[in-house]
């Protein structure tokens, strides 16, 4: 499995809705966990929280990340954007959103942005000419667009830290993907450095500077994310989770889980069940 699929496989992003919005309204309801918006026509000013307003123009792509609602102003009457609303499973467990700006803007003026043009053109054509099955087609195209945007972000290093920044580096990507695919292995900094083809010291420092935590911390966090995911979405026995994550005993797993999550695995499962 490749470096990006190893991350997306667990959280399995799905398009919830694709729609064209006229943003003469100052606040837009961005449903789902995250929205990829394509400016179809016109320009506007976009502001979020207390940050200075940013100009957005025809052809720009905006990746609006979870929990953020930009405000638009100064629009012309012709301003429209195509919004692809996506869900990612439990967002709080997804390392994709640990370190990422509220809105990531990919300008239409960037020469390499043309790589995204074919899938954008397909989306626009399908959205403007409703035909039999077009909702299904739009949703699948939106999911393909997400993958293309993530590839673009990684290839052009649009995010400086976090898991996407780590996956953008081929050396770190080998180590991170190994963690994603084989969380049951007894990884050490040295064995992960071997995966990356780097010295232990250089790997440890580079990983921390790029991803934002040490390799050991990332391994621990990934195991806890998997454990929470399984506790939320399945009836798998806790003993089986212990085996799948490579812990030598249930006691060691319980101790790690309580330290990271603040409660026992059983309490976590009960809490999630009570909320559903």
Image (spheres, rainbow, N blue to C red):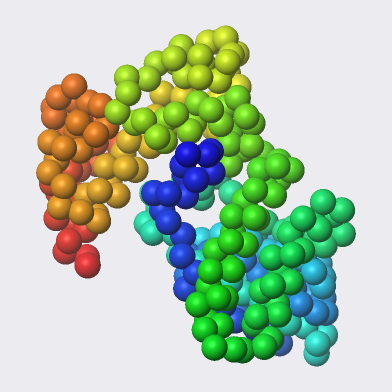
| Above or below, comparing residue 69 to residue 212 in the picture | below
| Above or below, comparing residue 5 to residue 109 in the picture | above
In the image, residue 80 lies at what x, y percent? 73, 82
Q: Residue at x 60, y 25 (%)?
A: 171
In the image, residue 68 lies at what x, y percent? 55, 64
In this rendered view, identify the residue nearer to me: 75 or 142: 142
In this rendered view, identify the residue nearer to me: 136 or 202: 136
Horizontal relation, residue 135 to residue 126: left or right = left
Q: Residue at x 22, y 26 (%)?
A: 247
Rendered image quadrant of residue 251: top left
In the image, residue 193 lies at what x, y percent? 51, 16
Rendered image quadrant of residue 90: bottom left
The answer to whether residue 117 of the structure is visible from this angle is yes
Q: Residue at x 87, y 53 (%)?
A: 111
Q: Residue at x 49, y 31 (%)?
A: 176
| Above or below, comparing residue 116 to residue 211 in the picture | below
The residue furthest front is 132
In this rendered view, identify the residue nearer to me: 98 or 231: 231
In the image, residue 56 lies at what x, y percent? 79, 68
The answer to whether residue 259 of the structure is visible from this angle is no
């Amino acid at each position: 499995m490749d470096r990006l699929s190893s991350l997306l496989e667990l959280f399995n992003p799905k398009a919830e809705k694709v729609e064209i919005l006229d943003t003469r309204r100052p606040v837009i309801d961005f449903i789902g966990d995250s929205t990829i918006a394509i400016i179809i026509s016109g320009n506007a000013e976009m502001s979020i929280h207390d940050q200075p307003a940013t100009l957005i123009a025809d052809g720009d792509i905006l990746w609006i990340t979870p929990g953020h609602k930009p405000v638009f102003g100064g629009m012309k009457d012709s301003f429209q954007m195509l919004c692809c609303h996506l869900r990612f499973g439990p967002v709080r467990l997804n390392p994709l959103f640990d370190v990422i700006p509220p809105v990531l803007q990919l300008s239409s003026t960037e020469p390499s942005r043309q790589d995204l043009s074919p899938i954008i053109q397909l989306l626009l054509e399908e959205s403007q000419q409703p035909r039999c099955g077009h909702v299904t087609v739009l949703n699948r195209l939106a999911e393909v667009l997400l993958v293309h945007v993530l590839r673009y972000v990684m290839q052009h290093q649009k995010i400086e830290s976090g898991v996407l920044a780590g996956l953008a580096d081929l050396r770190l990507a080998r180590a991170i993907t190994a963690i994603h695919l084989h969380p049951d292995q007894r990884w050490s900094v040295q064995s992960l450095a071997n995966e990356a083809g780097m010295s232990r010291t250089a790997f440890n420092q580079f990983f921390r500077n790029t991803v934002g935590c040490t390799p050991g911390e990332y391994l621990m966090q990934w195991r806890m994310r998997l454990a929470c995911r399984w506790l939320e979405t399945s009836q798998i026995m806790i003993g089986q989770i212990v085996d799948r994550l490579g812990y030598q005993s249930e006691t060691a797993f319980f101790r790690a889980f309580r330290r990271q999550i603040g409660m026992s695995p059983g309490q976590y499962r009960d809490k999630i069940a009570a909320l559903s």
